[in-house]
Image (spheres, grey):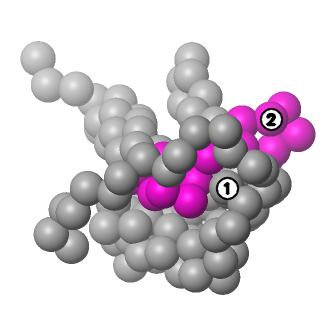
Amino acid sequence: MQPTPARHEHDDTRGRAERLRQEVLSHPAVERLDESRTSAVDTLLPGARIRGVAVGEAGEPVAIAVVLRFGASIPQVVRELRSLARTVVGDVPVDVTVADVVVSTEPPAPRVASGR
């Protein structure tokens, strides 16, 4: 039995939101996604919520809310996050919100080259 089109759309949105979340978290200047209750940046799915990234249907704009590590150049990180996001969601507008900057007690994770 094949999935209904509506179910397929939710699966595709979930997959893109989860991949986007992973890509953003892989950036060495990102401490975490902003998953606070006051953040409006969530992907809402039937029975689930993916906090910190807002992904709709294919081709729609997306949003990311992050907490950065102190010392990073915010404009540069925002440009890099937009570029990373577009590798997942395509050439759509990407809104990046820097919700906070923190002094991290852990060193940044090394960035793995991905051939992009």
Q: CA distance from mark 2 to mark 1?
A: 17 Å
Asked whether, in this view, residue 84 is left or right of residue 113, the answer is right
Considering only vertical position in the picture, is 30 above or below 3?
A: below
Nearer the observer: mark 2 or 1; the answer is 1
In depth, the one of 54 and 113 nearer the eye is 113
The circle drawn on residue 36 is: 2
| Disc marking residue 12 | none
- Residue on which the image places disc 1: 69
User: Which one is nearer the viewer's eye here, 43 or 112?
Assistant: 112
Q: Secondary structure at mark 1?
A: strand
Q: Residues within 10 Å of mark 2 (few under 14, many from 20)?
A: few
The quarter of the picture where the C terminus appears is: bottom left
Q: Which residues are magenta?
A: 23-41
Q: Which quadrant holds residue 39?
A: top right
Secondary element at tag 2 = loop
Instruction: Point out residue 22 in the picture as x, y percentages from the top left corner.
Output: 40, 44
Please give the name of the residue rendered at 69% of the width and 67% of the height, measured from the top-left corner: 71
Q: In the picture, residue 62 is in which quadrant?
A: bottom right
Q: Is residue 102 visible?
A: yes
Q: Report x, y in % for residue 23.
A: 39, 52
Residue at the (62%, 60%) spot, across then down: 63
Q: Is residue 82 magenta?
A: no
